[in-house]
Image: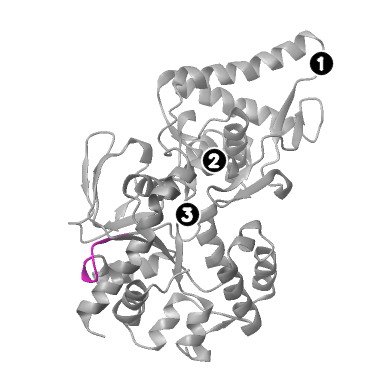
């Protein structure tokens, strides 16, 4: 096929996505930046919690904190327009101050609430890691702080950033994009020979400008860097590439959502053909169980699975020695994912998962190098994007 015809097919394929973008935005709800919470509202929410505790003490009752069960699938509903989100009347658990098992967590929640209150009052910020290092012996380990911060955010119905808790950024972005950070710093990803770190305050960036025809989310940093070295962002057509370096952090997810809200440009994912890669794609597209209470700010159901598809592994006849057998853990993950509510509305996904299960093999994106060293950027991605090879 001639390059000119290929180009026509390329953008005609993209136009099919663009035709639906307006309806997707309408269904998806408000922008992730549209509901700003004031410092006064945050302080009042914390004061209400403390008032309930004082009231209980005045009645000679042991104070109790009630937290929603964030990790219970029974509390989750799935809608194609938003993804995984908590139901309005979900089951809860009580954190009692008079129970030896839960009293330590009760105390730690109050400790972090008091830190948040002071930060909001003083207009200062901290990361979850900063909080942990204020008293590592008290908190025990970082995951305890992480879980409590998410519990507080869920309990107060206030996003983490509004609680003055910043997320540590690990993601990178490159390609046809420029923007201004909250402090006025101008960032131009287009001219940078290297990737730019995802900003720590995604909500604060403004003046986003891009001529990108699509956005490509890349699972692994190594693949991202290889595409950057191959100048992929400019060779085929102007695009934006972003990676969360595995499971994405909150800022990376917020940035992808902000790019979608701003440009409504087609978004594709490039993941390993394994259960872990599929799950990472699902986090971007439909959200995660533990953060389902913030789904409306984080998910982009319009995301498409570009590759690496299990069917691609068969179609391209990738050598067996370039593939990896599924472990027992992989098989359990795959079985679990096939029962997820969003798979029912994605029959093509289900077929891909069945291909993987039947072959008992998985493939990393790097398996494409068994065909040629630059097969990914020179053949695989251009053909996929030109001829609509996504699901």
- Mark 1 or 2: in front is 2
Is residue 242 magenta-colored?
no
Residue positioned 64% across, 71% down in the render: 330
- Disc count in the image? 3
Can residue 231 be seen in the rendering of this structure?
yes
Mark 3 vs mark 2: give the one in front: 2
- Element type at mark 3: loop
Question: Which x, y percent locates residue 19?
Answer: 37, 56
C-beta proximity under 8 Å, tags 3 and 1? no
* Sequence-earlier tag: 3 or 1: 1
- Side of 34 relative to 86 (left or right): left
Query: What's drawn in magenta, residue-wise?
Result: 234-240
Q: Is residue 90 left or right of residue 301?
A: right
N-terminal of the pair, mark 1 or mark 2, is 1
Q: Residue at x 47, y 50 (%)?
A: 249
Left or right of residue 318, residue 338 in this image: right
User: 184 above or below 143?
Assistant: above
Residue at image mark 3: 248
Residue named by callout 1 = 61
Few, some or many residues within 10 Å of mark 3 (<14, 14–19, 20+): some
Point out which mark residue 294 bears.
2
């Amino acid at each position: 096929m001639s390059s000119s015809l290929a180009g026509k097919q390329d953008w005609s394929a993209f136009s099919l996505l663009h035709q639906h973008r307006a309806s997707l935005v309408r269904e998806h709800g408000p922008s992730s930046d549209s509901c700003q919470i004031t410092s006064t509202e945050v302080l009042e929410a914390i004061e209400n919690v403390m008032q309930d505790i004082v009231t209980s003490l005045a009645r000679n009752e042991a104070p109790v904190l009630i937290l929603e069960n964030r990790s219970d699938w029974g509390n989750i509903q799935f809608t194609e327009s938003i993804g995984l989100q908590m139901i309005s009347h979900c089951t809860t658990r009580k954190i009692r101050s008079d129970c030896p098992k839960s009293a330590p967590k009760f105390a730690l929640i109050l400790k972090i609430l008091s830190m948040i209150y002071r930060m909001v009052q003083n207009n200062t910020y901290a990361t979850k890691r900063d909080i942990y290092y204020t008293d590592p012996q008290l908190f025990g380990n970082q995951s305890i702080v992480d879980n409590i911060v998410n519990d507080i955010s869920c309990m107060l119905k206030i996003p983490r950033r509004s609680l003055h808790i910043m997320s540590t950024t690990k993601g990178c972005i490159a390609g046809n994009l420029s923007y201004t950070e909250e402090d006025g710093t101008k960032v131009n990803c287009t001219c940078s020979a290297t990737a730019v770190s995802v900003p720590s305050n995604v909500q604060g960036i403004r003046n986003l400008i891009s001529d990108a025809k699509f956005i490509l989310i890349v699972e692994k940093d190594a693949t991202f860097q290889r595409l950057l070295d191959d100048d992929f962002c400019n060779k085929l057509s102007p695009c934006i590439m972003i990676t969360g370096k595995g499971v994405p952090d909150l800022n990376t997810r917020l940035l992808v959502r902000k790019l979608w809200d701003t440009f409504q440009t087609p978004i594709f994912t490039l993941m390993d053909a394994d259960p872990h890669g599929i799950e990472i794609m699902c986090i971007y597209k439909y959200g995660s169980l533990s953060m389902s209470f913030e789904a409306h700010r984080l998910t982009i159901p319009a995301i498409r699975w570009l590759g690496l598809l299990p069917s691609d592994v068969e179609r391209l006849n990738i050598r067996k020695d370039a593939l990896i057998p599924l472990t027992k853990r992989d098989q359990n993950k795959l079985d679990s994912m096939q029962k997820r509510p969003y798979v029912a509305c994605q029959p093509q996904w289900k077929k891909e998962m069945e291909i993987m299960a039947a072959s008992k093999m998985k493939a990393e994106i790097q398996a494409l190098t068994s065909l040629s060293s630059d097969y990914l950027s020179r053949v695989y991605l251009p053909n996929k994007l030109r001829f609509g090879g996504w699901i």
